[in-house]
Image (cartoon, grey):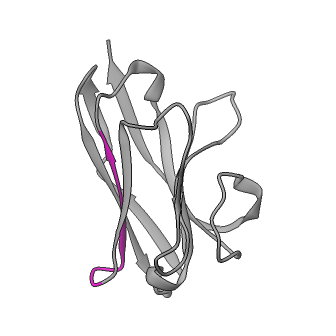
Amino acid sequence: VQLVESGGGLVQTGGSLRLSCAASGLKLANEAIGWFRQVPGKEREGVSCVSSHTGPTEYADSVKGRFTISRDNAKNTLYLQMNSLKPSDTAVYSCARTYYATCTLTPSVYNIWGVGTQVTVSS
């Protein structure tokens, strides 16, 4: 089982990026999965998640209206579209799978993690 993120990079304030999380060894359509971010010296923060099958999504207040999570079941890939990026969005972004069917932004209930992709937003 593996999750591999891509799509990070350097972008100016106000710009956009789309992160991808490709899964192998599990069907993302059947899983509750999420995006998290972490800055060195700070705790990991839940950004967004989507529950299994056609379940609900959740967003952190800091990204509501700017970020959109989606899942392409045919490609077995999770996405995070990030618009109107701010310097405070700078972090390593990781995708993860939880053993619950309903997603949550609490990192401790996620048991499969990708290694992450760096997002840097310049001012």
Q: Which range of residues does the magenta coloring cover?
A: 74-82
Quadrant location of residue 110?
bottom right
Say which quadrant the C terminus sits in. top left
Quadrant location of residue 20?
bottom left
- Does the rendering let one see residue 100? yes
| Residue 81 counted in the magenta span | yes
Residue 103 versus residue 6 in the image, above or below: below
| Residue 49 counted in the magenta span | no
Which residue is painted at 37% across and 22% down in the image? 86
Pinpoint residue 19: horizontal percent, then vertical percent: 33, 52
Pinpoint residue 65: horizontal percent, then vertical percent: 38, 37
Residue 98 versus residue 117 in the image, above or below: below
Residue 106 versus residue 31 in the image, above or below: above
Say which quadrant the N terminus sits in. bottom right
Residue 76 versus residue 111 in the image, above or below: below
Which residue is painted at 44% across and 28% down in the image? 90
- Does the rendering let one see residue 115? no
Pinpoint residue 43: horizontal percent, then vertical percent: 71, 36
Quadrant location of residue 67?
top left
Counting labels gives 0
Q: Is residue 101 left or right of residue 87?
A: right
Which residue is painted at 70% across and 54% down in the image? 107
Residue that sits furthest to the top in the current view: 123
Which residue is painted at 24% across and 36% down in the image? 16
Predominant secondary structure in magenta?
strand
Pinpoint residue 52: horizontal percent, then vertical percent: 54, 77
Q: Is residue 92 left or right of residue 109?
A: left
